Amino acid sequence: MKKAFITGITGQDGAYLAQLLLEKGYEVHGGVRRISHPTLSRLDKLGVANDVTLHEFDLSESNNIYRTIDKVRADEFYNLAAQSFVGASWELPIYTADVDGMAVVRILDTLRTLTPETRFYQASTSEMFGLVQEVPQSETTRLYPRSPYGVAKVYGHYITMNYRESFGMHASSGILFNHESPLRGKEFVTRKITMGLARIARGGDAPVELGNMDAKRDWGFAGDYVEGMWRMLQQDDADDYVLATGTTTTIRDFFTFAAEALGMDLVWEGEGEAETATDRKSGKLVMRVNPQFFRPAEVDLLIGDPTKAREKLGWESKVNIRQLAEMMAQADYDELA
Ligand code: NDP
Ligand code: GDR
């Protein structure tokens, strides 16, 4: 039986990956950090909380990382833990640099010392592309991060590549474009939209307040993306891969798809900070822009080229954007029953 360790097992991707690896017959271990209200709610929702072995684990503690790696001695190590909210990274730039950047070398160097045969996956991100240099973005596109989060992830990405090249470690980075699900954190724009609209559909009156409606993202379903992570570690040679759908959608269009899934018919008015959306059927204001949610620097357009993953891993994204919006809106609507 293969043994896997997942950092960030309590997060969106960690939960889906744990479920996938259990289905594949792995012994699954995961790291949980000490917080006042620890929650296994995502693992519970997928029905796997009792099937994984949890270890106290924090990315900022070198000795804790060392002891955990020594104790578990995993065949595969998936580093999914991070301060993952781009918006918060301007408030927490140093913390973000530490846990999203430095922690990667803490893990890699410990693996190198204790279990150099362990296969390693690093959660890299399309946020590393930042300011548009090329469309669509692939493994060879120049990096130009636009947030402290993106900058920290660039370090994690390059140090993973460097340990692969320096020490021959089986260390791969998945450059994943946005992927969402009903388990998505509530501060991210897709879930914020589907939760806000579901509340309105259940009788609420508070409009969803959003920032930049023109940003474009390449959104897929998280359940598909964890399969790609696993496939990367099954290759003979480690490498870096983009996982994306190859299509892009504005925040406004995602909002429209989610509203339509809940039976609304939107009228859009105004521009920029004055933009609003109203549901023609109920007459309710359902969206207004709040400048509080604009970012100091924005990533305007992300669209990925998943050709390499398709050709080498046989991977592709299966859920399209309308299906994704519908899945998330319906799940939030059902949760409020
Ligand atoms: P989540 O925010 O849902 O999960 C993050 C996880 O990291 C949680 O389990 C969290 O624990 C844990 N964590 C945070 N800080 C620490 C710490 N100091 N020590 C130990 N654990 C910590 O993220 P996702 O599942 O969406 O993303 C997984 C990874 O993929 C992240 O690295 C993210 O940056 C990256 N990524 C995500 C994309 C996406 O679209 N979802 C796209 C590209 C990359 P807790 O439950 O205690 O908060
Ligand atoms: P992102 O996701 O920054 O792409 O990072 P997020 O959903 O936070 O933002 C996407 C886009 O929506 C715009 N936006 C808003 N965003 C939020 N959160 N709240 C709002 O009210 C709002 N209004 C507009 C943002 O400006 C942005 O353009 C996610 C995370 O999962 C990262 O960890 C991951 O690396 C990247 O995806 C790929």
Image (cartoon, rainbow, N blue to C red):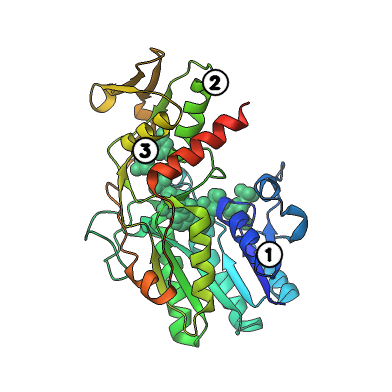
Q: Quadrant of ligand 2?
A: top left
User: Vertical placement of 324 versus 129: above or below?
Assistant: above
| N-terminal-most mark, 2 or 3 | 2
* Marks 2 and 3 in Cβ contact (< 8 Å): no
Residue linked to disc 3 = 254
The reply to whether the residue tagged 3 has its Cβ within 8 angstroms of ligand 2 is no
- How packed mark 3 is, by other alpha carbons closer than 10 Å (few <14, some 14-19, many 20 or more), is many
Residue drawn at x 61%, y 32% as measured from the top left:
335
Tell me the kind of residue under disc 2: Arg
Question: Which dot marks residue 22?
Answer: 1
- Along the line of sight, which residue is nearer the eye, 143 or 103? 143
SS at mark 1?
Answer: helix
Q: Which residue is mark 2?
A: 202
Q: Which amino acid type is shown beneath numbered disc 3? A: Phe
- Using the image, determine if residue 171 lies above or below residue 78: below
Q: Is residue 93 visible?
A: no
Pinpoint residue 28: horizontal percent, then vertical percent: 70, 66
* One can see residue 228 in this view: yes
Neighbours of disc 2 within 10 Å: few (<14), some (14-19), many (20+): few
Label 1, label 2: how far apart the Cα atoms are: 36 Å
Kind of residue at badge 1: Leu
Q: CA distance from mark 2 to mark 3?
A: 20 Å
Is disc 2 placed on a helix, strand or loop?
loop
